[in-house]
Image (spheres, rainbow, N blue to C red):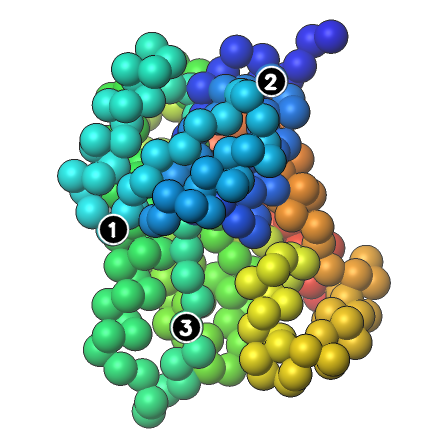
Amino acid sequence: MNLPLDGRVAVITGGASGVGLGIAREFADQGARVVITDLEREPLDEAVATIGPNCSGVVADVTRLADMEAMYREVIARHGRLDTVVANAGIGAHAPLGATTEEQFDRTFGVNAKGVLFTVQPAIALLPPGGTIVIIGSTASVQPPAGMGLYGGSKAAVRAFVRSWIQDIKGSGIRINVLSPGAVDTDSLRHALAMAQGADAVPAAVRTMGEGNPTGRIADPREMGTAAAFLAGDASSFITGVELFVDGGMAQV
């Protein structure tokens, strides 16, 4: 069977849980050899075990350039090549205007903006012509809800990065795109809802979120995986610099 990502080597940051794990599973199922990164060894090892033999893990902090450079050296030592990078690692902070702290700003932009830069920049010299980079954005880049200005601003920064970067690497044959999810049914989303509304209220809250979407539901993490695999593969060979909203139409109405 011809698998779309057969033989490719892909790095996925923040791959131990949530959207990153969904993407890693899909890439492995489509034939890629996947290297996931995250901050802690135990959840990383658990994720690798669930994905299977085509996956390995490296502990790395995207906010530390030395960590990312070391991670890429390890990838090349293991696999001899790099074909795709998915800059997925990110955090959210509820920080309304008037109550935003310096720590919240530094942490949010450190992971969501600086972390993307430090994920992409060291990879450029390693990717061949035809190599691909997928950056996970958010519908908050265009529709940030109240109290999410820091998060939305950091994701809008990523979109601006890509508009410039595709010009910086003109002629390299490398493509860079942004994939922006809306609400995705992850453990972290359900945990946040439980903290805000109580555990018993979570199923109803998820249903309510879905009812506000044109599709009538929120996304599964694997749906982010199939979209990311499209942007990483040959089917999107003439697509670069776009922000693809994988949100069930929520940001379009």
| First along the sequence among labels 2 and 1 | 2
Contact (CB < 8 A) between labels 2 and 1? Answer: no
For disc 1, the neighbor class at 10 Å (few under 14, some 14 to 19, many from 20) is many
Amino acid at the residue labelled 2: Gly
Percent coordinates x, y for residue 55 in the rendering: 50, 26
Q: Which residue is mark 2?
A: 31
Q: On the rendered image, what quadrant is the N terminus found in?
A: top right
Residue lying farthest top? Answer: 1
Q: Quadrant of residue 213?
A: bottom right
Q: Which residue is mark 1?
A: 63
Residue in the picture at 35% in, 34% down? 58
The reply to whether residue 78 is in sight is yes
Amino acid at the residue labelled 3: Ala
Q: Is residue 67 above or below residue 140?
A: above
Q: CA distance from mark 2 to mark 3?
A: 35 Å
Contact (CB < 8 A) between labels 2 and 3? Answer: no
Frontmost residue, 209 versus 74: 74
Left or right placement of residue 93 versus residue 69 in this view:
right
Residue lying farthest bottom? Answer: 98
Residue in the picture at 33% in, 10% down? 80
Q: Which residue is mark 3?
A: 93
Tell me the element at label 1.
Answer: loop
Q: Is residue 14 above or below residue 236?
A: below
Percent coordinates x, y for residue 174 in the rendering: 39, 23
Percent coordinates x, y for residue 21 in the rendering: 55, 42
